[in-house]
Image (cartoon, rainbow, N blue to C red):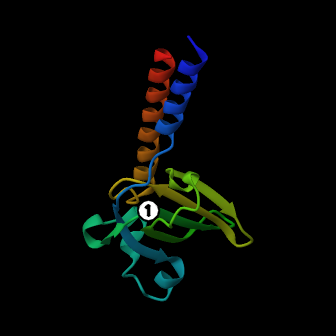
Amino acid sequence: MQFTEVLACLLILCCTIVPEPIEGTQCYLCSWSQKEEAIGINHTLKCRDEYFQPDKVSVTHCDYGCQLHIFKDLNGIIESVRRTCGKEPKSRMDISSGCSATRMRQGTVKVCRCQSDYCNSSRGTVIASLTLTLIGVLITMMFFLWRC
C-alpha cells in the first residue's frame, strides 16, 4: 500500500470519528434542586431521574445538542439536576458526546453532552447513547483499517 493511500484512509477515518455540527436537536428542559424541594417547591421533582416523566417536561429545539447537569455534594448526594440545551461549541471537541466531572469545594458537577433527540432524558439514556456512538466509531475504524 502506498503512502498516499494510507494518508487518505487516515484522513477519512479522522473525519468520520469527529462528528459534524448538528442541524438541531429536541431536548428536555427542566431543573430540580434539593433546596426547592425542602421548602415545598416540588413542581420540578419530575426532572429527577427517579421521577422523570418525559410527557410532563418541556421540550425545546437546541442548535448544539443537549446537556444533563448533575450536582452532587461532598457526600455524593444529588443536590440538583438540570436538563438543557448544549452551549455553542468553542472547538470541534465540544461537539462530541460525552460526560465530564468537575470537582469543586461544595461537591462535583457532572455534565453530559449528547447529540440526538431527547438524549438528555436520564443518565441511563445518555450512557446508552454514548455506548452506541462508541460502537459506531469502533466499527468505522475497523472497516477503514481493514480496507487500508
Residue at 43% in and 88% down: 40
Which residue reaches farthest right? 105
Q: Quadrant of residue 66?
A: bottom left
| Residue type, mark 1 in image | Tyr
Q: Nearer the viewer, residue 39 or 67?
A: 67
Residue 127 image offset from top left, x and y in percent: 46, 47
Q: Determine crowd level at label 1: few under 14, some 14-19, many 20+ residues with C-alpha closer than 10 A.
A: many
Residue 108 image offset from top left, x and y in percent: 65, 64
Residue 128 image offset from top left, x and y in percent: 42, 45
Task: Tell me the residue that label 1 is attached to.
Answer: 64
Q: Nearer the viewer, residue 53 or 127?
A: 127
Residue 83 image offset from top left, x and y in percent: 43, 68
Please tell me whether residue 47 is drawn above or below residue 130 in the rendered image. Answer: below
Q: Secondary structure at mark 1?
A: loop
Left or right of 70? Residue 133 is left
Q: Nearer the viewer, residue 68 or 86?
A: 86
Which residue reaches farthest bottom? 39
Residue at 47% in and 70% down: 82
Left or right of 59? Residue 114 is right
Please tell me whether residue 124 is drawn above or below residue 50 in the rendered image. Answer: above
Which residue reaches farthest top? 1
Residue at 50% in and 77% down: 33
Left or right of 140? Residue 54 is left
Q: Nearer the viewer, residue 15 or 48?
A: 15
Q: Quadrant of residue 119?
A: bottom left
Which residue reaches farthest left? 55
Number of callouts: 1
Q: Which quadrant holds the N terminus?
A: top right
